[in-house]
Image (cartoon, rainbow, N blue to C red):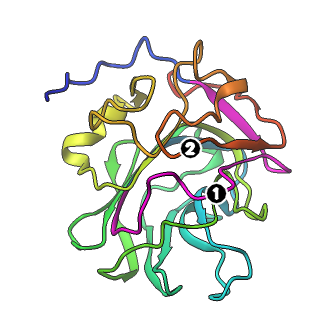
Amino acid sequence: MTFPFPSSGVNFVPGAVNFDGTNDQVGRGADLTGTADGKAFTLSGWCDPSTDQVNRILTANLTLGGGTGADISLGVALTATGAPILSARNAAGTIILNLQTSTTPILAANGWHHLYVAIDLANASNRHIYVNGVSQGLTVTTYTDDAIDMTVADWTIGATSNGTNRFVGDLAEIWFDDVFLDPSTNLSFFARNNKPQNLYADGSRPTGTAPLVYLGGHSRYNGLTSAWHNNRGTGGGFTVTGALTDASTNPSK
């Protein structure tokens, strides 16, 4: 199957929502349907933080207070200085991924940013974080050839399942799957000229099949704020805690 080269995105205006940092988050309340422990994942999303602090974007949550004492199995977050940071554990609770960017930060003063993360723990050459289409330097603490525990008690957007490290600001077009998509051939499906691209109603444009998670869509249709949290991917439904509101701006502008 072949796919058309992504359009410029001029006519695509995605739904964008605001997380207030007080009680807003989106949660699955269960494992993602169809997922399995594995070494690879790709995340794409647009974020415009309102404050510079520790912000969770996507988290795979273990049962809080579980046997390992760890509540995060896979996490994509921003540090207080705006550095995207990744962490992951295996099924035994051992940290097998811990790295963050050392170059372009995602700061509140700089508006919308596109974040692209592609990881394959089986190959140290396949670890990438792009911000606004630019490959970022990485500070790597741990990178182990092992499977990430992705069969967990909950998956959340905008906070951990117990409500800590809430994202404060606007999010759009959250796309996640347990595959490695090399940015050299796939990044342009998600962003081009630093504008969001139409991923199709079910998020299938990059690979030809729907991902596990796709929250977003055209702002006039499935990306409406009232429906933004409805997962168009295959991993099952999400619910909102708090009340998402319209973002003040849009990454397509």
Q: Secondary structure at mark 1?
A: loop
Q: If the image is split into quadrants, where does the N terminus sit?
A: top left
Q: Nearer the viewer, residue 126 or 232?
A: 232
Report the amino acid beneath label 2: Gly
Image location (x, y in percent) of residue 214: 50, 38
- The residue labelled by disc 1 is 30
Magenta segment includes 16: yes
Q: Which residues are magenta?
A: 15-41
Q: Specify few, some or many for label 1: CA neighbours under 10 Å numbering under 14, 14-19, or 20 or more.
A: some
Mark 2 → mark 1, Cα distance in angstroms: 9 Å
Vertical comparison of 249 with 62: above or below: above
The residue drawn where x is 59% and y is 24% is 15
Left or right position of 117 against 33: left
Q: Nearer the viewer, residue 105 or 173?
A: 173
- The residue labelled by disc 2 is 236
The residue drawn where x is 68% and y is 32% is 17
